[in-house]
Amino acid sequence: MKILFVRGPDATHMLAESPFIDGLRKLGEYTDLPVSADISPEELASIIRQYDVLLTMWDNIAIPAELAEDSGRLKYVCNITGSLKPWIPPEIILSDNIIVTNWGDLPANCVAEGAFTLVLAMLKSLPAYVMNIRRGGWTPPFLHKSGSLYGLRLGMYGMGAIGRRFVELCKPFQPVIYVYDPYIRELPEGCIRVDSLENLFDVSQAVAVHAALSPETHKSITAELLARLPDDAIIVNTARGGVFDQQALFAELESGRLRAGLDVLDEEEFHDTLVPDHPARQWENCLFTAHSISLDGWGKTEHSYSAMYDRALENITRFANKQPVNYIMDFERYQKST
């Protein structure tokens, strides 16, 4: 079996020597191939056709769509990470000749932990406490804003694997959980379905966003929806910033009416909305975690390697042994993914 990793010019995440690479070499012939930005799709496709397995991940070079019709030896694209739309075209997903997998539900625990952390941090007004202490104060002037998950009307926009894990973390504290997700047939026990975003925002005191970014969800949380929330309501977003009308969200936060724990911002507007001297960096009602709240590297040794490599190696091993692989990316899931 021949395995290829094409290292494009933007490959900031690189497959260095590691137990993962050692595992690949035990399965077959592994090649790490740097290519230039000006390589033609035809040339790249002719190279890839010589291999059985293609590895892809963050910052990958675009995979030629023409491989869908003429794949050569290629039978399996193992995307080590979650996102894949920017470099794997839909033709590859739809091809009868090639299977594509990603890391599936792997980030669910860490992202759900991050969302849970942000809900509690804002519910207890931790940013305001920190700033008050740093200014020389002690007793906070905002005690009325500290709350509890017990009985909290917690709205959830999206109920995928991360959302379900988030529910499991919250349930012991007995919030009342409302869910809007038109694509999920069955909700976790005890959750209450609502049939529109308007209804979700009408009943919620806090809203946690777990929806993927798609044409349907893009800027779906509008100024009108945010206005439906009560004063001092909480927004938590560990999904994608583009789900919000970011200017509308920032207007509510700047006024002090809402609170937010934001792990993500709208990537299209980030550089305009959070420049180094932007006043949002000083808002006491907001906590930014720079798309890093789910990181789990602390405590790992230099010989450890991420669980995403474990999962990829497991799937490639299954493929080598002619066993079914897990987390196949079908077209429906591809369309909903980021």
Image (cartoon, rainbow, N blue to C red):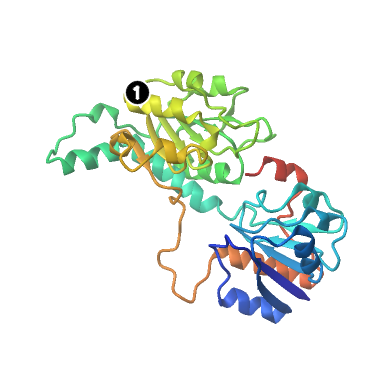
Q: Does residue 155 appear left or right of residue 74 in this picture?
A: left
Q: Residue at x 45, y 25 (%)?
A: 248
Of the pair 147 and 229, the residue shown nearer to us: 229
Check the image and report above or below for 141 versus 290.
Answer: above
Q: Does residue 82 appear left or right of residue 248 in this picture?
A: right
Kindly identify which residue carries mark 1: 257
Q: Which amino acid is tagged 1?
A: Arg
| Percent coordinates x, y for residue 310 in the rendering | 61, 67
Q: Decide if residue 233 is in sight here.
A: no
Of the pair 128 and 254, the residue shown nearer to us: 254
Of the pair 266 and 217, the residue shown nearer to us: 266
Instruction: Provide the secondary structure element on which disc 1 rests.
Output: loop
Residue at the farthest front position: 38
Q: Residues within 10 Å of mark 1 (few under 14, many from 20)?
A: some
Q: Residue at x 55, y 33 (%)?
A: 243
| Percent coordinates x, y for residue 294 in the rendering | 46, 52
